[in-house]
Structure formats: C-alpha cells, structure tokens
C-alpha cells in the first residue's frame, strides 16, 4: 500500500477505495478502509484528525472538521461544513454480536448528519439517527432519536433544550443567522 498524497500524518492507512477532494487531509494513526462496492468519499477542504477510523461507504462533505479519536461506522453520510468534536462515535449496528461479524449477517442502520451541524466531543450517535441542518449536539450527549434542523440537544438520552436561533444562543452561533 502506498502513501496517499492527502495523508499528512504518520502511521495512517488509507486503501485504494478512498477518494479525497481537493485540499483535504487525514492526520496521524488513522484507518480508512473503503471497498470496491462501498468506497469512502471525502469532500474538498475537509480535515480528519488523528486516531480516527472510518468504515466503508462513508461520505463526508466539503469544508468539514473532524477532530481526533473518532469512530465513524459504515455508510455514514456527513454533509458540508460539519464540525465533529473529539471522541465522538457513530454506532450503526443496533444488535452487534461476534457471530454476526464472522458470518457478516449484521444489519447496518446508517447515520446522516446534515449541513452545518455541530457535534460536541464525546457524543454517541445511535444507529439510524439523522442530525438536522445547523443542529447543535452538546458534549457527551447520547443521541438515540433524530435531531431536528436547528435544534440544540444535550444529555443522556439527548433532549432538545432550544433552537440555535433562540436569543440566548445568538452569540454562540452567529454563522447560523442567515441559514
């Protein structure tokens, strides 16, 4: 396996089924393994932090910032201008087991993150959830249900406490004003 020009870090493995957009980069100790049927596609100007694993079929948009120590399960879709904090996990298998792994009988429930979403550090996203446009998920939240566009959610389980357009969040999310 040769080093891909978008690999900026040491000890990172990227196979031939990973497609990078312009000016994107992946850093130290990452594993990105696409397959011929399910390549990984990474958009333009997207940065992937160290110690991250990305599974087959994942699609990541343009201008995203994925921090360190992420696990992104199979067939996840991440929109444009998305921020994902360190230590976040995208768990796509509702009923994992060893036997299902060996006989490949597991069922994937892909996760979707829409444009401009912000996901704090240490968040767990459950199988099949959709995170809405411009939604904000607070650090350490456990997301088991869909998150609406513009929602502010926190907690375990995550619950909506506001909207990014609410007056009390206006200074926290000025970039969402016109979205």
Image (cartoon, rainbow, N blue to C red):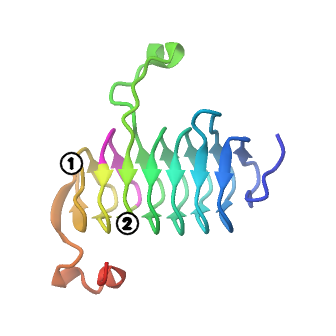
Where, quadrant-wise, is the N terminus in this rendering? top right
Q: Which residue is depicted at the point 38% across and 45% down? A: 111
Residue closest to the far front: 37
Q: How would you classify the magenta stretch by its main secondary structure?
A: loop
- Is residue 44 found inside the magenta-colored segment of the image? no
Left of 53 or right of it: where is 8? right
Q: Secondary structure at mark 1?
A: loop
Residue 35 quadrant: top right
Residue at which label 2 appears: 118
Depth check, front residue: 125 or 105: 105
Residue at the image position 62 percent from the left and 56 percent from the top: 50
Residue 156 in picture, x, y percent from top left: 23, 50
Separation of marks 2 and 1 at Cα, in angstroms: 18 Å
Asked if the magenta segment contains residue 128, the reply would be: yes
- Which span of residues is magenta-colored? 121-129
Tell me which corner region of the image, top left, top right, bottom left or bottom right, holds residue 13: top right
The answer to which of marks 2 and 1 sits earlier in the sequence is 2
Tags 2 and 1 touching, CB below 8 Å = no
Question: Residue at (29%, 86%) from the top-left corner?
Answer: 171
Q: Which mark is residue 175?
A: none
* Residue on which disc 1 sits: 157
x then y, percent, for residue 159: 17, 56
Residue 172 appearing in the image: no
Picture coordinates of residue 45, whole percent (x, y): 61, 69
Count of numbered circles on the image: 2
């Amino acid at each position: 396996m040769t080093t891909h020009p978008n690999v900026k870090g040491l000890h990172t493995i990227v196979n031939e089924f990973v497609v990078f957009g312009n000016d994107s980069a992946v850093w130290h100790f990452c594993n990105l393994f696409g397959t011929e049927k399910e390549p990984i596609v990474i958009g333009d100007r997207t940065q992937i932090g160290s110690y991250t694993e990305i599974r087959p079929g994942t699609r990541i948009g343009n201008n995203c910032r994925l921090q360190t120590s992420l696990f992104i399960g199979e067939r996840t879709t991440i929109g444009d201008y998305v921020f994902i904090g360190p230590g976040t996990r995208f768990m796509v298998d509702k009923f994992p087991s060893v036997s299902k792994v060996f006989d490949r009988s597991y069922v994937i429930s892909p996760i979707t993150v829409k444009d401009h979403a912000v996901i704090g550090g240490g968040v767990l996203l459950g199988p099949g959830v959709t995170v809405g446009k411009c939604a904000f998920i607070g650090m350490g939240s456990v997301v088991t249900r869909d998150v609406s566009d513009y929602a502010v959610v926190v907690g375990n389980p995550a619950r909506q406490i506001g909207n990014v357009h609410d007056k009390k969040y206006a200074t926290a999310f000025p970039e969402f004003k016109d979205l």
